[in-house]
Amino acid sequence: MYQILKQIVRTGIRSEAPPATDPELRSIAQQLEAAMLRTLGRALVIRQIDAGSCNGCELEIHMLSNPYYNLEALGIKFAASPKHADMLLITGPVTKNMETALLRAYDCTPAPKLVVAVGDCGAGCGVFGKSYASCGGVAEVIPVDLVVPGCPPTPRALLQGILTAISGV
Amino acid sequence: MRLLDQPLDFARLPGEVAAYGADTDGDGMLAFAKAVKDSGGRFVALWGADQREDAAGYAVHVAFGLAEGLALLTLPLAADAPRYPDLEPLYPAANRPQRATRDLLGIVATGGDPRPWLRHNNWPADFYPLRRDCDASRTFPPQPEDYAFVRVEGEGVHEIPVGPIHAGIIEPGHFRFSIVGEKVLRLEQRLGWTHKGVEKRFEQMTLSDGCRLAGRISGDSTVAYAWAYCLAAESLCATAVPARARWLRALLLERERVANHLGDLGYLGNDAALSFGLSQFMRLKEDWLRTQAQLFGHRALMDCVCPGGVAIDLTAQGAAALVEQCSAIEREVRLLKHIYDEHAGLQDRFLTTGRLAPALAAELSVAGLAGRASSQTWDLRLQNPVSPYAELEVQMASHRAGDVAARVTLRFEELFESLRLINEIVARLPEGALCAPLGAPGRALGLGWIEGWRGDVLVALQVDGDGVIRRCHAHDPSWNIWPALEHAVMGNIVPDFPLINKSFNLSYSGVDL
Ligand code: SF4
């Protein structure tokens, strides 16, 4: 225990200031009202869905929880069930084999059902393209509020996208 | 030449990988497979190809791992009835690759498991995407699937279905647990959810475009895949890669190993309720990735390895930064290892949990990290090294216990060894060119085989006369390890599954393709 406490003290606080929001990232205009944005901004719950990614995007999403980005300190956390989520954070080109599962998760998600498509794959310009096995992007299957491009996007870009999705217009 | 004194004439395949190829028929393949098994070798991979354009019907390729290297058997199959004997009775690990080959090409293992694997009823049963004349841009409406899971009967037995979407931030798969009380009697996996048609996508790409795709088959192993792919491409084109590029590739591969081990060690602590471990290791991993972004332009090292060499370089200043970072990380990880080792709660969760016994690991052809934690001492960096590994004298770690604790300890040991290797590579890095132009590709089969952080990644590549890829099969080590996980959880309690699963940390995308 002593070693653990010593290491915690020695490590100190590494959290960095979050990035500024960027309305340019939006696919569609902000549809949430100011009152809701104020509430959400303090307590956003995200359900992440891998709809056929290479796992590269997931690895960077994981990094959001490290002490540098410290997502939870911003009031944002990941939930296990889409029923508890305000936002779906979706990676991958949406494989045909995941299409039905994604649609079901989307149906279960309560309003406001924000959808953020992550990575070049999610954005529809990824390496896997469109075929018998791949729908070719999240927007091919469900409506998308905001896209975070990159292969994979950096944690900072992801954070900026998430914060933009819950920022005022 | 003869391998294992079998009546097959093997020819050394071109390129750096110690690989030997022979054509044979079904009986010849079975006899050789048995000889491999008796000699302590292992099944590595199985895949098919459509060769009807050359009036050569179909082919199935079976790769075995031997002390000498890779033995690759090719069975020509008739165009009207492409069948070959079921290998599963000898090698249980052949089950899934055989089913995938049937789904994609319509090549059948006679008497094999008839259930589909990659096909989830979202395209028709007679639509074989890897047949050369198949129009892969066709799409079909998704259909519900009734997959025949094996049922466990008995009083008090019930099933827990999990997935495809899992509770955490991980790749999709379906796990069907049969349990009594808290105890797992049986686990059956159903994968294939992330099948995105990678192999079909390769066709029509040029050799250089294909590298970008290969580096995205499993995002956590981009260096291993890109290097294996490039080895295959370079062997096809008889291209000699400059020495500096070869050493830089090894530097990148060892950095990829360290990055993954740092992340896994954090999550393994977390899954056993020590969130301190996660914060600490993820902080170190972030430092590690930031250095990669700074020096090599990409946090995960994607597109740093390219056909003919590397797309990055290392300055003297960068080299100094790497050495300094290695010693900083080593200091911190030694301290964290001490904390993990002394933490009674953690060790209680790790020890004897999720045990994969050595004999079973051998039976299932398990290699890689999971194999070495169960006495399967395969490591290509030692046994079949490509340059510069022959000059590096990698120290292999291995354990007998095969439990979560062994896989944790192995990660610590391999991490320290990789840090040592990075230092050595930086110190001995040759001067010279970074990339050589690819020569004109030949029509033979090119092979690449690289020991990634999870295990051996195999890439087999063929091109057409105009330099366009005709067939590319990339084989993830997870193919053989996933079935071992089904065994390792038996008798454990359901709440230990996430910990056991994490201790293997297998790729979904890499096997779904
Ligand atoms: S965007 Fe890139 S990193 Fe993300 S899933 Fe696609 S290929 Fe992988």
Image (cartoon, grey):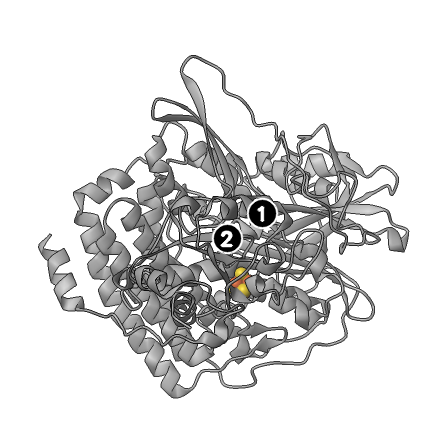
- The residue carrying mark 2 is A50
With respect to residue B247, does B271 lie above or below?
Answer: above
Q: Are marks 1 and 2 in contact (CB under 8 Å)?
A: yes
- The residue carrying mark 1 is A98
Q: CA distance from mark 1 to mark 2?
A: 9 Å
Q: Amino acid at mark 2?
A: Asp
- Asked whether B310 or B19 is in front, the reply is B310
Q: Secondary structure at mark 2?
A: strand
Residue at the limit of the structure toward the top, as seen here: B155
Q: Amino acid at mark 1?
A: Met
- Asked whether B362 or A147 is in front, the reply is A147
| Disc 1 crowd, CA 10 A, few/some/many (<14, 14-19, 20+) | many
Q: Which mark is residue B105?
A: none
Residue at the limit of the structure toward the right, as seen here: B55
Looking at the image, in which quadrant does ligand 1 appear?
A: bottom right
Q: Which tag, 1 or 2, sits closer to the chain's start?
A: 2
Asked if one can make out residue B476 in the rendered structure from this viewpoint, the answer is no
Q: Secondary structure at mark 1?
A: helix
- Asked whether B440 or A126 is in front, the reply is A126
With respect to residue B220, does B296 lie above or below?
Answer: below
Q: Position of residue A165 (x, y in %)?
A: 43, 66
Chain ID of residue with mark 2 = A
Q: Position of residue A52 (x, y in %)?
A: 56, 53
Q: Position of residue B335 (x, y in %)?
A: 20, 60
With respect to residue B253, does A45 lie above or below?
Answer: above
- The residue shown at (30%, 55%) is B266
As drawn, is B169 to the left or to the right of A8? Answer: right
With respect to residue A27, does A46 lie above or below?
Answer: above
- The residue shown at (36%, 32%) is B494
Chain ID of residue with mark 1 = A
As drawn, is B349 to the left or to the right of A34? Answer: left
